[in-house]
Amino acid sequence: MDIKYLNLETAYHPPVWCDIDLKAMAYNFEQLQKLAGKNMAHSLGVMPVIKADAYGHGMVEIAKCLDDCGCKYFGVSNVSEGVVLRAARLKQKILLFESTLVKEAQDIVDYELTPTVCALEMAHALDHCAHQAGIQIPIHIKIDTGMGRLGVNEDYALDYVETLRTECPNLILEGIYTHFPVADTDRDFTLNQMRRFRDIVYSLENQFITFSYVHAGNSMGLGDYKSDLFNLARPGIMLYGVYPLEDLKAKVHLKPLMTVKARIVFVQTIAKGRGVSYGHTFKAKEDITVAILSIGYSNGYMRSLSNKAFVLISGVRCPVVGRVTMDQIIVDITAVTLSGRIPQIGDEAVIMGTQKGESISADEIAHWADTISYEILCSLGNRQPRIYHS
């Protein structure tokens, strides 16, 4: 039997998996909609960012959950992701943040996707395909006001938009946006960035060029900056219950969606003085009991977590000892055994999430790994089976 057709909750017991709480997603979406209403004077709501397989949570399942919540617009990275959503029969508007390759123009038209346009060559290709189909297609224009990545340089924005209006009659100028690179670290730069972008939008309005959607608010932008210009927010990480900055917890309450679990596959005693795992970077200072868990860097549990991280077993924080290996980690469970309980092969350990009142967050794991929570979610979420709970 093809494993992809099995119900993971009843058919077999995976050694490592993610539990995804769809009720938490619905709750977070509602809270962010309310926050958008507070922070944007003319809010049209939020466009959930579900690129990168919904930050490791499963793009199609998350999109279907948001569809049930009344979501009207999705943000994804590229054409491939947009096509996956269309194949799942999702009818919402889908904005592509990355759409610069001319060869993708026909697919954009065929699958009724909304491209970001910041290169004239792509604009002309889209205009041609739309003309051939006898339709007009909506586009969003990205202006680079400080990210230094994709986008029309702000100094040329007015001329660029006027060129599109003149040379591409089959393109509907539906949206205009920019992106905040330092909203969490440099408030003055971000506020100045907002002012410069506002000047561009107002100058275009003076030329009778208006847009239905004006946006810049990623999670940090939505949570910490008020605007009377923007009318659409595009939160990513906060949808999944993780904050880009601790201070935002005071402004909106969110619930994490993802819990990562692994099973104990072996238990043994390590004698004082013995080393464990490759390189013997850890040696026991006394007799200890260790559990071997079925998760390693092949599952997205980073090698940089070696000798730094903790997991939860029986609600107790247990340190990862020795180097993380490809498929397994070694965990010191002596504190659990001293409480009178000996963990058994097959027992669940929580890698990220909550167990018996104790929690390990994506932010904590990111700190131990010297990275960011975004990478933790994508790394852990994309590499194991997911079980959805609604």
Image (cartoon, helix red, strand yellow):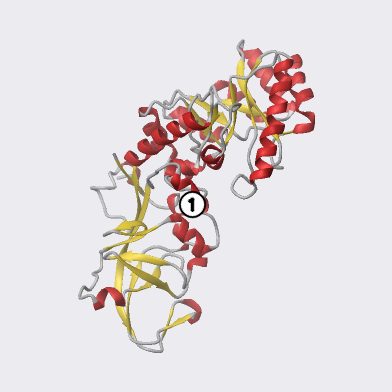
The percent position of residue 312, horizontal first and vertical second, equals 33, 64
Which is nearer the eye, 115 or 244?
Answer: 244
The percent position of residue 322, horizontal first and vertical second, equals 45, 75
In this figure, which residue is indicated by the disc labeled 1?
A: 246
Q: Residue furthest bottom?
A: 273
**Relative to 199, is 280 on the left or the right?**
left
Quarter of the rendering occupied by the C terminus: top left
Residue 270 falls in which quadrant of the image? Answer: bottom left
Q: Residue furthest top?
A: 134
- Residue shown at 29%/44% (left/top)? 6
**Relative to 50, is 176 on the left or the right?**
right
Quarter of the rendering occupied by the N terminus: top left
Residue 253 falls in which quadrant of the image? Answer: top left
Q: From the viewer's perspective, is residue 126 above or below residue 282?
A: above
Q: Amino acid at mark 1?
A: Glu
Residue 231 falls in which quadrant of the image? Answer: top right
Which type of secondary structure does the marked residue at label 1 adopt?
helix
- Residue shown at 66%/22% (left/top)? 126
Q: Is residue 188 visible?
A: yes
Which is nearer the eye, 159 or 131?
Answer: 159
**Relative to 155, is 230 on the left or the right?**
left
- Residue shown at 72%/20% (left/top)? 204
Q: From the viewer's perspective, is residue 89 above or below residue 170?
A: below
